[in-house]
Image (cartoon, coloured by chain):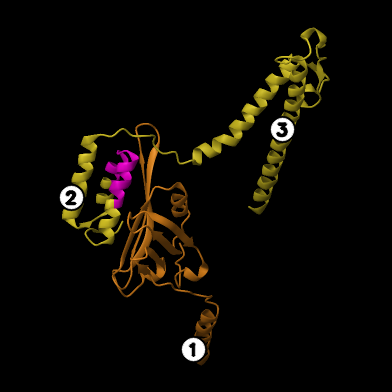
């Protein structure tokens, strides 16, 4: 069991190191591409005339994509960088999005839902002693309200429990 | 027979000597200040059947694919003081999610609104019950 865990740890470390190496490579390529673009593009105004700027020589890159010594143009380098950055951003962003706890967006006011919320609060007041199902129903109604109304409904419930008008253990 | 009795007595002593530290925290609520605290085991085995403390979360899926989350903490102490607060704050919900089964719970709330302003947990060995049954 311990051996398997150790092997997994080594595997995880290797994968992390590989990702870091890929990121460094992408950063280096981005810097090269930016330099190439800066040379190729004419200044916006008042600079040297386009004719005076010589076309940049294709840049030789080493590394996984240029291991055979192939010459990449700035355009090809940009395409590679875009791919690498997209993959990196996806790898970075995906877990965060899963744990973000995204809540619903703005909810439009609805007088019927507001009235239903009010009726349910009155129902809880009349019951005095409420259970978990009553709380869930109340919260479900609150979830359908705009944020300000939702907060108000929850505050009413909290105050009612704290001052003893409603009793409940959930 | 004598040696059996002696070994039983010694084993009981040894058990007591290796019990570890305990630090029961009675549920204490200051409703006027909006403060509550206490550990779950002490509350659970309190002589007063009304004493309790805890927190919970409800999440409701919405048609749009998101969800709405509500968290709450509540308790009652031996004096009959009651505490309840609610929260939709992501950080406070995260604290509730990280709670343990036997720990100390503390929370504060805005008395005017009933909204939780602070939620804390302390998961320590000294809050564990005297004995946990094995599976």
**Mark 3–mark 1 contact, CB under 8 Å?**
no
**Rendering colour (chain B):** orange
- The chain letter under disc 1 is B
**Mark 1–mark 2 contact, CB under 8 Å?**
no
Q: Which residue is mark 3?
A: A22
Across and down, in percent, residue B26 comes to 39, 72
Say whether residue A141 is magenta.
yes
Element under disc 1: helix
Q: Is residue B63 left or right of residue A129?
A: right
The residue furthest bottom is B2
Q: Residue at x 24, y 50 (%)?
A: A134
Across and down, in percent, residue A159 comes to 28, 56
**Rendering colour (chain A):** yellow
Residue mark closest to the camera, 1 vs 2: 2
| Residue A134, visible in the rendered structure | yes
- Local packing at callout 2 (Cα closer than 10 Å; few below 14, some 14-19, many 20+) is some
Q: Which residue is mark 2?
A: A123
């Amino acid at each position: 069991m311990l051996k398997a865990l150790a092997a997994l740890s080594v595997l995880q470390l290797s994968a992390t190191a590989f990702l870091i190496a890929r990121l460094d490579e992408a950063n280096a390529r981005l810097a090269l591409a930016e330099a190439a673009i800066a040379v190729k593009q004419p200044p916006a105004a008042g600079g040297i005339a386009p004719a005076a700027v010589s076309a940049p020589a294709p840049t030789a890159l080493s590394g996984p994509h240029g291991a055979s010594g192939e010459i990449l143009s700035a355009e090809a380098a940009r395409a590679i960088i875009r791919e690498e950055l997209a993959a990196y951003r996806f790898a970075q962003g995906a877990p965060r999005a899963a744990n973000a706890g995204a809540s619903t967006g703005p909810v439009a006011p609805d007088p019927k839902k507001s009235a239903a919320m009010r009726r349910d609060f009155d129902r809880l007041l009349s019951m005095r002693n409420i259970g978990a199902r009553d709380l869930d129903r109340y919260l479900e109604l609150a979830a359908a309200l705009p944020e300000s109304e939702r907060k108000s409904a929850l505050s009413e419930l909290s105050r009612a429990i704290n001052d003893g008008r409603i009793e409940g253990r959930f | 027979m004598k040696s059996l009795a002696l070994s039983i007595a010694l084993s009981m002593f040894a058990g007591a000597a290796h019990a570890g530290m305990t630090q029961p925290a009675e549920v204490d609520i200051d409703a006027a200040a909006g403060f509550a605290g206490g550990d779950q085991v002490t509350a659970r085995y309190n002589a007063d059947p009304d004493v309790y403390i805890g927190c919970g979360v409800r999440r409701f899926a919405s048609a749009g694919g998101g969800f709405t989350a509500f968290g709450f903490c509540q308790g009652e102490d031996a004096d009959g003081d009651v505490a309840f607060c609610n929260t939709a704050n992501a950080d406070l919900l995260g604290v509730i999610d990280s709670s343990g089964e036997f720990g100390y719970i503390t929370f504060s709330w805005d008395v005017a609104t009933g909204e939780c302003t602070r939620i804390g947990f302390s998961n320590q060995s000294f809050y564990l019950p005297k004995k946990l049954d094995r599976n």
